[in-house]
Image: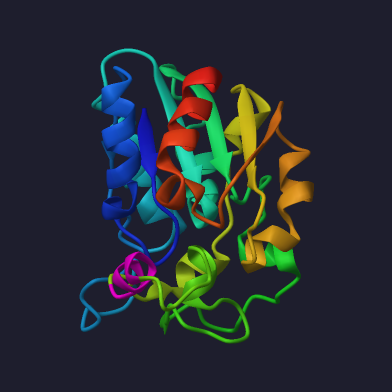
Amino acid sequence: MLLVHGGHHGAWVWEKLQKELAEQGWASATVDLPSAVRDTSAPEPLPGVHDDALVIRDAIDAIHGPVVVVAHSYAGVPVTEATAGAANVTHLVYVAAYVPDIGESMFGAHGIPTPPTLAGLRPAENPDLNLPGAFYDGDLNNPDTAAAIARLVPQTVRGDFETVTRAAWHTIPSSYVIPENDISITATVAERMAARTGAVHRVPGHHAPFYSNPKEFAALLTRIA
């Protein structure tokens, strides 16, 4: 399996799930998307959807044999682009994720107009769009949640608004996972996004259910795969 993190995150968010998958005999790989910017002094143009898609496709091409690609939240956008035409991708799993069609972007799904410039960074804490606690259990007093929030990084505006040119879910079998307690902005479009996939599953947990409920999520992935 290839596990692709959402905005503001990194490959670290999959560590708990990877442990559970390994115990069940599943090999997994991760990527760090460049649109989640660790070096805020980096010059423009900053990475966006298509830079992320290249990283994802390189990871897919490095896997010999069939692969299930799991996309969380924002990652649904570059995964949709990257997996088109990938012969070894057998299934796409969108987890509280965006499932764009050709010409669509992440924030376009919410009707947010594209700004005049795609330069700049968006901090993880943005009262108009998301609060970090919504990624997990919403409890800022939970030490595990606080530790995760401390690892979040800014996301590029280019990633928010760049559109896809290919939509792999039209040809590759896909599933959608809706967390029961998702209070993030993504939850407002989840049902509409899920309708584009072939099957819908509901799991306990918040926006990142594999982080708060890794054992249950690993069991679901096993059934899907």
145 part of magenta stretch: yes
Q: Is residue 127 magenta?
A: no
Residue 134 visible in image? yes
Report the side of 93 relative to 150 (left or right). right
Is residue 124 placed above or below 78 in the rendered structure?
below
The answer to whether residue 97 is above or below residue 169 is below
- Res 184 quadrant in image: bottom right
Question: What percent of the width, then of the height, locates residue 104?
Answer: 67, 55
Which residue corresponds to the image point at 62% horizontal and 59% vertical from the top-left? 105
Q: Please provide percent x and percent y for residue 87.
A: 44, 17
Q: Residue at x 52, y 57 (%)?
A: 74
Span highlighted in magenta in the image: 143-150
Q: Position of residue 35 (x, y in %)?
A: 36, 64
Q: Is residue 190 above or below residue 121?
A: above
Identify the residue at image location x=62%, y=28%.
174
Q: Can residue 27 be spotted in the picture?
A: no
Q: Is residue 19 left or right of residue 81?
A: left
Q: Residue furthest top?
A: 65
Residue at (61% x, 61% y) in the render? 106
**In the picture, residue 94 is in which quadrant?**
top right
Quadrant in which the N terminus appears: top left
Q: Give the vertical position of 189 relative to 2 (above or below).
A: below
- In front of the other: 108 or 146: 146
* Image spot of residue 158 (x, y percent): 47, 70
